[in-house]
Amino acid sequence: MKVLTIARNTFREAIRDRILYNLLFFALLMIAVSLLLATLTVGEQSKIIIDIGLASINIFGALIAIFLGIGLIIKEIEKRTIYNILSKPVPRYQFIIGKYLGLLITIMVNIIIMGAGLYLILIINELRWGHDIFNVNLDIWLDIWKAIYLIFIELMVVTAIALMFSTFSSSSTLSAIFTIAAYIIGHLTEELRLIGNKLPDSFMKSTINFFYYFLPNLDNFNVKGKVVHGIYVSASYISLVTLYGLLYISVVLLLSGVIFQRRDFK
Amino acid sequence: MNMEDIVIKIENLTKVFKKGFRGKSVAAIKGLNLEVNEGEIFGFLGPNGAGKTTTIKILMGLIYPTTGKAWILNKEATDVEVKNRIGFLPEQPYFYDYLTSREFLRFYGQLFGLEGDELRTRMNNLLTLVGLEDAADLQLHKFSKGMLQRIGIAQALINRPDLIVLDEPMSGLDPIGRKEIRDIILRLKEDGKTVFFSTHIIPDVEMICDRVGILMKGELVNVGRLDEIMDAKVKYVEIIARNVSKEMLAYMEAMGSSVYETWEHVSIKVEDENRVDGILQLIKEGKGRVVSVIPQRETLEEHFIKKIGGAS
């Protein structure tokens, strides 16, 4: 109940934050611009639109997750609002979970809006070419939601990481750099493993292996290419990857809770 | 005194902060011992940087002590459950300023598990108590400092706490604002609550506190009832009298009192309290009339400044 109270307040704060609207505006702009790019190609316009659209949702979603995620705790400390919350009968871990859930709701709402924007552009594109919109390849259109769903799981992981950095750092910039680095490396873990395997035993190899094992493999959540090219994404794959994401999030949140519990709020 | 009557108990509390990367240690409070009894208004007095806020943050479980322990209502200060019975106003209210008064009080009420009609009734009562009925639907960023302080007190009372802890509740307020806060504190005492507040504004303490603790550079230098702290420090007794003969005045001066005559009265300053009775006797014997006998105490301010001088 207290978790939900904090989550609701976090959501309310986020939707009264200007950054959110800026990011959302540019995301929708990108999706709309895909319509122009699509005209440059011969046929396959909808593929281009879906490709650019999903990429925009992913990138802008990640920006929202990183920037709002880092602010979640740091802003509470900077503005000293945290003193008054933690002096109420709210265990610190519940505060963290509440903040996390609040941001997830915000991200979900944004992703749904961006997804709706993508559909709108697709419909406009079909109408422009005089196609019957009830006669399009529905499978691909529905698969878009599989991709968006997995983007959301990925953003849940990224938000958890941003939250963790902000539980012990008091610098937003540093936390942002760490989180962005984790996000980029998280998309390159396969390459990391390949490099690691080719290296002789050394400090470098241990470091690379460390990153490989400790950072999430965010490429698992990337089915954008498959969806664009109409390759089937199975339900079992989606469930398995979801489970992986939730496990990773649990560990990160647990760690955040432990760090946060011991922290002094000077 | 029963254990149940002690609301706050601080035992040998020390907090050391590490500063910078080098880890230079600074002790914010050193070996603090303090007890606050049920139903009293306790003033926690000290200059800026004395460690008042650090102590309060430890009491609220916001920071952990390096050594020592603190109990509130017979539970350890880190116990989340005990916070159900505490109302807290942090130093300079920093609140979510995008909320209106009502949203704000509802949010904190919900953190105490309050809801529905009960929450609504309490919200309305508190808005009346602090005189903010007209600002109920105004966002907090439009509030003046005095209004913020008042809504801050309202949120501290939403759970009907037994103990109210206020960190610098009167700082930055004008005289009227200060009086309003003092009145609220006195009303809380009438309702049987215990109030613990920190301040560096001395008259506020003099006017309403049952007991005070004076904190200096992290150490408690004095604690007790105001008259206890001050009584031991009567500087002189001033006797004002009429119809005292010149000879008698000269005699008194010779005995070490200083005498000052106005056209009607004579004021006699007696530094040694034990001599007062003898002098009063002399005046009576000489058919003089005693108008008043006033022990002139050190004001808290003088006491405070002397203490600061002594500590630095």
Image: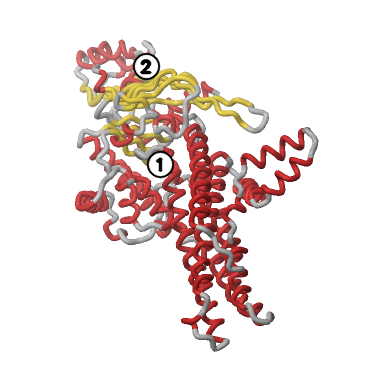
Question: Disc 2 residue type?
Answer: Glu
Of marks 1 and 2, the one in the foreground: 1
Element at label 2: loop
Please name whichever residue, B147 or A100, is drawn nearer the observer in this view of the structure: A100
Please name whichever residue, A140 or A91, is drawn nearer the observer in this view of the structure: A140
Q: Against A53, is B91 above or below? A: above
Residue lying furthest right: A200
Please name whichever residue, B151 or B172, is drawn nearer the observer in this view of the structure: B151
Numbered circle sitting on residue B41: none
Numbered circle sitting on residue A94: 1
Work out whether residue A159 can be spotted: yes
Q: Are marks 1 and 2 on the same chain?
A: no
Residue that numbered label 2 is attached to: B271
Q: Is residue A55 left or right of residue A249?
A: right
Q: Are marks 1 and 2 in contact (CB under 8 Å)?
A: no
Distance CA(mark 1)–CA(mark 2): 63 Å
Image mark count:
2
Please name whichever residue, B131 or B31, is drawn nearer the observer in this view of the structure: B31
Q: Residues within 10 Å of mark 2 (few under 14, many from 20)?
A: some
Element at label 1: helix
Counting from the top left corner in percent of width and height, residue A31 is at 58, 72
Q: Residues within 10 Å of mark 1 (few under 14, many from 20)?
A: some
